[in-house]
Image (cartoon, helix red, strand yellow):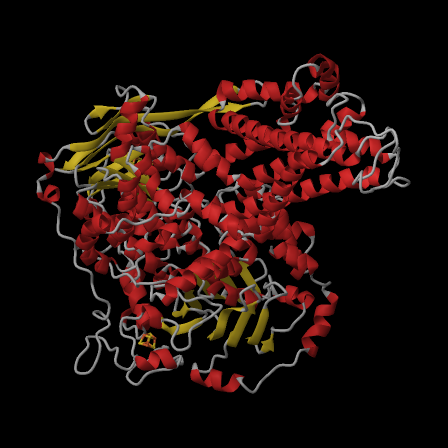
């Protein structure tokens, strides 16, 4: 994108004339400079408004955003989808469509950017302001090599010849940690993995020594270990260039350790703004408080129910008057419905927040005050089902997977396909789920967790090994009828609730489908549907609505209702909350927890998010490249992670706790997940293993030649590493 | 969204269903309702019914038969005795039109239905099951595509001229489903991997059911549009066959043959052309209206459905319902904007 836009930019000659013509507004610079100890802000956005025309009327995506960023500072902007956080940064970059109505002021070094034409803007973009997007694949042009694109970015803004620019490009790639930059410079974007592409994007962003880097969800599409690498690279890039960073994300954990200041956005406005520690430890606005309370934490020890924020964000077309958060706020009072609160610093607080009651929201509560910790009713933990109270050994197993294998042939050739290799997607997995138990299966993308799950759900028994469901080996289950009977007791919930619900069916029909399939008559089905809707917290009268009429969280509830329609024993959950915003996610997690205890369910919970898994799972299996590398009781795996991969994985999870986060030591993994078509000999983790590097040659030899098997470390804790050793990382 | 509340509600909910038999509205009924709300579609149905009435009741009131010749009136304009005039052989155009319309209505609608059904079922089966089902079906498709269908029908038509003309319907349908089937197949290939299909599969829903409940409805728009086009194509195809003397064999007529005969007189003896052509256009219009209405009714995203959803929500609001879906949905749309 940057290359495309910079190409549209003018020649270097007219840039000189331009500078002189631009009026520099001095007046408002003084007070800002005073406030912040003499350093004038680099970027100053004030009272920014953006609206888009739509059929239903203008969508007011941004409604008065003001912030300033000083040189070398990192500002984090957090908010959920639709909060206007991305739109406001797009406005800064001048990348909004022409139909958007942008008002307010955006000043860079005192120069007004708003209203500049595209040609002038292009000269600033990529030079003074650089950007890093969520999806680097769409930001890089697929038909040019990475090097060409970086060279072009350099040459647009700097007077360098081809050779020098190329040398610089290689330097940059080296800086962002791309191995073998001399060769990789000629690679095409599709030859890079997601993490590498993001690195290349960062290289391109810093090519012209920008003053400010705007990073819009730069790590959202990446796995957690890769996220840690990329954040590290961003930090390094900042050190090298001294640029300020505006980091836009929905992840409070990422911001905690990375940003100096944070701005929380809700419904197009900043609702709280201040130094990270202030906002995280002394929030003064119910939305921020709710957001912080709704995140499951990887360092949370005792099991507690999360505090979800009820409801959904308001429509940006017809905003109610008063506080936009009023409908979801647990402490709303009359004035909230009348007047929208300004972003002000309340007496006693030292950062501004937009809430009529922020004065009362002081830490610890007290006389006439509200304690932020208690304003949200903490849902009680569901009472354990009788099965859950039994000791584990006395429960029966609902799912046993023994040495399951799934290999795909790697074919080449269009007409005559030759087998050129084997993709070992699942390479010998053994696990067991007992009644009333949740097993969390975690791993990064490409580790084979989804294949495992589909292999189990297919009831085919895999290529080798066995799958035993409710005591029956699926291979022995012959005939459509017997299979159908098995299916009744095991159901699945997919990640994307929109894709897994047939958009052309009213939800009543969607919920009726499993019932009908398993022979329920119409009357019973009709009685069951409102019951199910109520079970998952939806209005039972809504059965004739279509999935599109519900919000993401509600749709996921519908998926859950469908899975529970037949009162199964085992529910397989494939990343059930990863498509949801955090405040919504908490509600769904609580619901899952509660249903499990109420109905005595067993879950196989597949996820990449370790904090979610820690919250919900009783036992955890960590997967790497088609194998389980560590398996055990949640508590002991999190406290004493023993496999080097688990340790790295855990240490990469960002904590929504600035002080802890800054104090943490990250174990950074090198490189990407190898392809499952090319599994290393011996221990499959050895080419990335930080421990391997510390071993002596004799021990290394063992890692190279001997494939480690799971061996017991504690009563319910096994790890597949020859040199497994507990290491606390959270 | 509060789970808390619902936990408390739960026992109540368990008790109520017996007292309060809920009337669940399924997809079929919703579709029907939405179809009935569409004015144009109803007009289409009205026109179609009138056309049928006209085609079948018309001959009863007309004193001329389609094979009668009035030797006192050649190429006469519309008059009291010949309402639509006569042609060069003294045949009553009204009688010809009604008789032709009978044939064309049946041929058009039957061919449209059979073709689309064939294309949908075979295409979806090929795509869904893959393997040999796919190979055999696609082999047939390719074979039929390269066969000169027009020639085959032309060659065959004398031999079935003596039996029923309905064989013509079958032949026309047999040679027009292939391209649609190919499209349906490739759409099925992508739909097959969608999560809602997988979800149904893992629920234990049978393959045939999945095809008819999930896969085909997801391409309803395509099938409906294709169906309406096939109806028109059949009518035209039949008339071009008839033009060359195949297809409907004289003395029997179809709208196509009547129009074909009248084309050369269209400027001089206009009634020969305009009356039958007018009915063909009406037929086409009616089918198009119905098709549009069906498509809207099937698609919950169409503007019509939205209007309905809004109406329901308004109702919900007045009942004092929690109506938090409205913002939720809108947020979705702003999200799209913010990512743009
Ligand atoms: S202004 Fe009122 S409704 Fe808004 S967050 Fe504060 S207390 Fe809640
Ligand atoms: S076996 Fe060796 S290479 Fe593998 S994880 Fe353990 S120490 Fe690392």
Q: Is residue A516 left or right of residue A674?
A: left
Q: Give coordinates of residue B160: x percent, y percent.
A: 69, 14
Asked if residue B320 is positioned above or below residue A103 in the image, the reply reads above
The quadrant holding residue A365 is bottom left
Residue at coordinates 29% horizontally, 32% vertically from top-left? A519
Residue at coordinates 73% horizontally, 23% vertically from top-left? B248
The one nearer the camera, A104 or B161, is B161
Q: Give coordinates of residue A200: x percent, y percent.
A: 53, 50
Residue at coordinates 56% horizontally, 49% vertically from top-left? A138
The one nearer the camera, A141 or A196, is A141
Which quarter of the rendering shows the C terminus of chain B?
A: bottom right
Which quarter of the rendering shows the N terminus of chain B?
A: bottom left
Q: Is residue A436 left or right of residue A704?
A: left
Asked if residue A638 is positioned above or below residue A100 in the image, the reply reads above
Q: Give coordinates of residue A38: x percent, y percent.
A: 46, 82
Ligand 2 quadrant in view: top left
Instruction: Specify the farthest residue to the right.
Output: B268
The one nearer the camera, A196 or B73, is B73
Q: Give coordinates of residue A188: x percent, y percent.
A: 58, 42
Instruction: Specify the farthest residue to the top.
Output: B159
| Camera sees residue A689 | no
The quadrant holding residue B85 is top right
Q: How many labels does the image show?
A: 0
The quadrant holding residue A309 is bottom left
The one nearer the camera, A126 or A668, is A126
Q: Is residue A622 left or right of residue A122?
A: left
Asked if residue A207 is positioned above or below residue A186 in the image, the reply reads below
């Amino acid at each position: 994108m940057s290359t495309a836009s910079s190409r549209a930019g003018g020649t270097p000659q007219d840039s000189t004339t331009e500078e002189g013509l631009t009026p520099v507004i001095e007046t408002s610079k003084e007070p800002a400079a005073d406030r912040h100890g003499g350093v004038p802000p680099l970027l100053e956005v004030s009272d920014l408004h953006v609206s888009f025309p739509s059929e239903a009327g203008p969508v007011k995506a941004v409604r008065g955003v003001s912030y300033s960023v000083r040189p070398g500072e990192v500002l984090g902007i957090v908010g959920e989808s639709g909060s206007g956080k991305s739109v406001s940064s797009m406005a800064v970059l001048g990348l909004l469509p022409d139909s958007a109505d942008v008002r307010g002021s955006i000043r860079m070094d005192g120069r007004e950017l708003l209203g500049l034409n595209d040609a002038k803007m292009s000269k600033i973009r990529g030079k003074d302001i650089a950007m890093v997007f969520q999806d680097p694949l769409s930001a890089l042009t697929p038909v040019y090599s990475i090097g060409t694109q970086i060279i072009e970015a350099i040459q647009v803004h700097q007077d360098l010849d081809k050779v020098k620019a190329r040398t610089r490009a290689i330097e940059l790639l080296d800086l962002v940690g791309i191995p073998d930059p001399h060769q990789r410079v000629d690679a095409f974007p599709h030859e890079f993995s997601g993490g590498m592409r993001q690195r290349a994007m960062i290289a391109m962003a810093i090519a012209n020594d920008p003053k400010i880097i705007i990073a819009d969800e730069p790590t959202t599409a990446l796995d957690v270990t890769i996220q840690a690498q990329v954040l590290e690279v961003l930090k390094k890039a900042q050190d090298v260039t001294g640029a300020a960073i505006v980091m836009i994300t929905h992840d409070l954990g990422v911001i905690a350790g990375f940003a100096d200041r944070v701005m929380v956005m809700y419904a197009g406005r900043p609702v709280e703004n201040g130094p990270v520690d202030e906002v995280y430890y002394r929030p003064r606005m119910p939305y921020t408080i709710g957001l912080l309370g709704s995140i499951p934490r990887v360092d949370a020890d005792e099991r507690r129910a999360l505090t979800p924020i009820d409801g959904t964000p308001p429509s940006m077309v017809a905003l109610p008057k008063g506080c936009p958060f009023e409908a979801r706020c647990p402490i709303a009072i009359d004035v909230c419905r009348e007047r929208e609160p300004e972003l002000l610093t309340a007496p006693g607080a030292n950062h501004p927040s937009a809430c009529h009651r922020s004065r009362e929201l002081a830490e610890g509560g007290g006389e006439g005050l509200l304690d932020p910790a208690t304003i949200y009713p903490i849902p009680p933990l569901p009472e354990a089902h009788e099965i859950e109270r039994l000791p584990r050994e006395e429960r029966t197993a609902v799912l046993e997977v023994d040495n399951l294998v799934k290999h795909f042939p790697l074919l080449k050739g269009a007409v005559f396909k030759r087998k050129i290799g084997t993709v070992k997607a699942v390479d010998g997995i053994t696990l067991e789920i007992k009644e009333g138990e949740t097993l969390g299966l975690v791993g990064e993308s490409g580790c084979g967790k989804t294949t495992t799950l589909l292999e189990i759900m297919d009831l085919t028994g895999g290529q080798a090994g066995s799958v035993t469901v409710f005591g029956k080996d699926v291979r022995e289950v012959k005939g459509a009828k017997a299979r159908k009977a098995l299916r009744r007791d095991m159901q699945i919930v997919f990640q994307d609730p929109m894709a897994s619900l047939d958009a052309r069916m009213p939800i009543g029909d969607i919920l009726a489908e499993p019932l009908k399939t398993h022979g329920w008559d119409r009357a019973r089905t009709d009685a069951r549907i409102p019951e199910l809707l109520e079970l998952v917290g939806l209005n039972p009268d809504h059965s004739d609505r279509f999935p599109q009429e519900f919000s993401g969280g509600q749709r996921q509830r519908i998926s859950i209702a469908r899975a529970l329609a037949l009162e199964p024993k085992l529910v397989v959950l494939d990343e059930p909350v990863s498509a949801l915003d955090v405040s919504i996610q908490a509600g769904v997690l609580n619901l899952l927890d509660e249903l499990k205890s109420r109905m005595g369910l067993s879950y196989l919970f597949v996820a990449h998010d370790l904090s979610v898994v820690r919250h919900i799972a009783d036992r955890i299996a960590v997967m790497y490249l088609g194998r389980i590398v560590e398996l055990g009781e949640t508590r002991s795996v999190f406290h004493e992670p023993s496999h080097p991969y688990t340790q790295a994985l855990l240490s990469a999870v960002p904590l929504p706790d600035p002080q802890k986060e800054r104090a943490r030591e990250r174990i950074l993994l090198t490189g990407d997940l190898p392809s499952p078509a090319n599994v290393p000999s011996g221990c499959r983790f050895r080419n990335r293993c930080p421990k391997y590097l510390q071993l002596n040659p004799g021990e290394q030899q063992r890692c190279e030649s001997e494939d480690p098997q799971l061996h017991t470390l504690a009563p319910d804790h096994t790890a597949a590493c020859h040199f497994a050793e507990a290491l606390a990382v959270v | 969204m509060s789970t808390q509340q619902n936990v408390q509600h739960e026992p109540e909910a368990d008790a109520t269903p017996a007292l309060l038999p809920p009337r669940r509205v399924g997809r079929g009924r919703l579709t029907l309702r939405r179809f009935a709300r569409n004015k144009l579609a109803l007009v289409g149905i009205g026109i179609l019914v009138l056309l049928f009435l006209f085609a079948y009741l018309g001959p009863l009131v007309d004193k001329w038969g389609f094979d009668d010749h009035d030797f006192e009136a050649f190429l006469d304009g519309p008059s009291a005795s010949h309402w639509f005039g006569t042609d060069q052989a003294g045949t009553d155009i009204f009688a010809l039109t009604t008789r032709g319309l009978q044939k064309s209505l049946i041929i058009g609608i039957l061919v449209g239905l059979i073709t689309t059904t064939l294309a949908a079922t075979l295409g979806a089966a090929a795509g869904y099951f893959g393997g040999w089902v796919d190979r055999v079906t696609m082999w047939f498709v390719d074979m039929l595509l390269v066969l000169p269908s027009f020639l085959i029908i032309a060659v065959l038509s004398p031999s079935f001229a003596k039996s029923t003309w309905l064989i013509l319907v079958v032949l026309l349908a047999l040679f027009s489903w292939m391209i649609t089937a190919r499209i349906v197949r490739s759409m099925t290939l992508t739909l097959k991997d969608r999560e809602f299909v997988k979800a149904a599969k893992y629920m234990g829903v049978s393959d045939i059911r999945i095809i008819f409940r999930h896969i085909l409805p997801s391409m309803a728009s395509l099938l409906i549009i294709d169906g309406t086009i096939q109806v028109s194509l059949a009518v035209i195809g039949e008339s071009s066959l008839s033009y060359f003397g195949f297809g409907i064999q004289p003395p029997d007529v179809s709208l196509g043959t009547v129009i074909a005969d009248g084309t050369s007189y269209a400027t001089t003896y206009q009634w020969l052309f305009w009356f039958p052509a007018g009915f063909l256009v009406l037929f086409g219009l009616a089918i198009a209206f119905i098709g549009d209405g069906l498509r809207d009714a099937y698609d919950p995203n169409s503007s019509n459905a939205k209007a309905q959803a809004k109406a329901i929500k308004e109702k919900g609001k007045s009942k004092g319902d929690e109506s938090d879906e409205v913002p939720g949905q809108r947020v979705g749309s702003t999200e799209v904007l913010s990512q743009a």
